[in-house]
Image (cartoon, coloured by chain):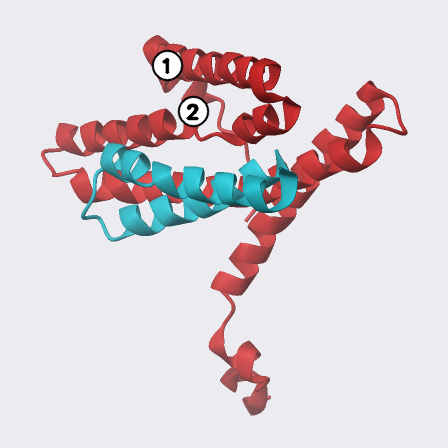
Amino acid sequence: MVVGAIALFVYAKVVSRLLAHGRTSALKATVFAMPVWFGIAFLGWAMFLR
Amino acid sequence: MLIQTDWSVIRKTKWHEYAVRFALGGLITAVAGFIAKEWGPVLGGLFLAFPAIFPATATLAEKRENERKHKHGLSGVRRGRQCAALEAAGTALGCIGLITFAATFWGLLPRLHLLLVFLIGIVGWVGVSVAMWFLRKRLRFRPKHSLSGARPLANHRR
């Protein structure tokens, strides 16, 4: 859960940056940033938890 | 500025907005449980922090702000997106609290009772999240003179 929460933190920061510029809709930003969560979460899992 | 609770938002929020959040939250909890059962609790725990509710919340917040501006004959696209961006920034701060909550469970659960650990975790989550909010506010809105160490002009005149 710690690793997942770190991934969620980065994901939320990315979404916040995408939306702050006002060029992307919330739906697109939240969906397109999803690989960021998966990438960091599974990288953390592979590095520290497996 | 003090942190306040605006109870009127509960009445303004439509029933289907609650339904979407509860459904997505419940779904991902069930999925995390399934993953934990099939592939172990470590991988299941990873999905307890999956962004399931946040996309729905951000989209609904954007839509609500958009509609509010439209009622006044204005385009609410930019305002809606900025509102969703603020939701995302708040989520990021809450994540630091969530890391504290998870770390509390990880460190204390083998030694203390589950309910006590849960209580400490919740208090830790609230404390760290609110502290992060104040810290961000302080760093973001600090006047330039305090960064350089110089006194404000008004103080020099006295």
User: For this view, does A47 lie left or right of residue B90?
Assistant: right
| Residue B44 figure quarter | top right
Identified at 48% across, 77% down, the residue is B144
10 Å crowding of disc 2: few (<14), some (14-19), many (20+): some
Q: Nearer the viewer, residue B53 or B9?
A: B53
**Residue B60 in the image, given as x and y percentages of width and height:** 30, 26
> Chain letter of disc 1?
B
Identify residue type, mark 2: Ile
**Residue A6: where, in percent of width, then height?**
55, 44
| Residue at point 65%, 23% (across, down) | B41
First along the sequence among labels 1 and 2 = 1
Helix, strand or loop status at disc 2: helix
Rendered view: B62 above or below A11: above
Q: Is residue B143 visible?
A: yes
With B3 as the anchor, is B78 left or right in this view?
Answer: left
User: Residue B19 is drawn in which quadrant?
Assistant: top left
Q: Residue at x 57, y 87 (%)?
A: B150
Q: Is residue B41 above or below residue A47?
A: above
Q: Please report, as a chain letter, where disc 2 is located.
A: B
Q: Where is the C terminus of chain B found, in terms of image quarters? A: bottom right
Report, in whole angstroms, how far the alpha carbon at label 1 lies from the one at label 2: 8 Å
Identify residue for label 1. Answer: B20
Label ID, residue B53: 2
Type of amino acid under label 1: Val
Residue drawn at x 63%, y 22% is: B40
Q: Colour of chain A?
A: cyan
